[in-house]
Image (cartoon, rainbow, N blue to C red):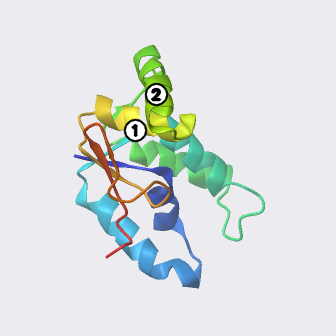
């Protein structure tokens, strides 16, 4: 199972002509079905997908339905364990807390790969390796 960062979900819904190649890659990742997510990723997706300044913003209902559909995948809750480990990862690797929380949610779901465009490609965070699926 591969853990998916928020940007993958956002590209999958993008209608921006400049992002269509990334949208196709993101959609194929989701369609493969071997992904895990976290509550944090779903929250970030909802906020960014409905952002009024987004050219192709979704309505509350559209975004809520998508979030609900994503719950067919394993979802890591925000737990005290994930939070505490994220604090340690943030300090150890000098990444933002939010990135560290995603790394630790991936670890908690036993995902060795974290698909993200926003983190350092090929960086290994003590057993969780970031892969940018758009660098191919």
Q: Which one is in front, 63 or 120?
A: 120
Q: Which one is in front, 94 or 68?
A: 94
Quarter of the rendering containing residue 54: bottom right
Please give the residue where the numbered disc 2 appears in the rendered image. 86
The residue positioned 67% from the left and 56% from the top of the image is 59
The residue positioned 55% from the left and 34% from the top of the image is 97
Q: Position of residue 68 (x, y in %)?
A: 46, 43
Residue 39 in view: no
Quarter of the rendering containing residue 128: top left
The residue positioned 45% from the left and 73% from the top of the image is 23
* Disc 2 packing (10 Å; few <14; some 14–19; many ≥20): many
- Specify the label residue 103 is tagged with: 1
> Mark 2 or mark 1, which is nearer the start of the sequence?
2
Horizontal placement of 128 versus 39: left or right?
left
Mark 2 element type: helix
Q: Position of residue 36 (x, y in %)?
A: 32, 43
Q: Position of residue 53 (x, y in %)?
A: 77, 62
Q: Are marks 1 and 2 in contact (CB under 8 Å)?
A: yes
């Amino acid at each position: 199972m591969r853990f998916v960062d928020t940007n993958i979900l956002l590209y999958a819904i993008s209608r921006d002509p400049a992002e269509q190649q990334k949208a196709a890659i993101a959609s194929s990742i989701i369609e493969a079905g071997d992904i895990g997510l976290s509550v944090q990723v779903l929250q970030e997706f909802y906020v960014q997908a409905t952002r009024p300044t987004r050219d192709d913003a979704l309505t509350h209902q559209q975004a809520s339905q998508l979030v609900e559909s994503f719950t067919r995948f394993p979802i890591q809750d925000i737990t005290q364990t994930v939070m505490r480990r994220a604090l340690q990862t943030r300090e150890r690797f000098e990444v933002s807390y939010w990135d560290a929380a995603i790394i630790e949610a991936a670890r908690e779901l036993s995902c060795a790969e974290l698909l993200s465009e926003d983190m350092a490609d090929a960086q290994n965070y003590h057993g969780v390796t970031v892969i940018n699926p758009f660098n191919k």
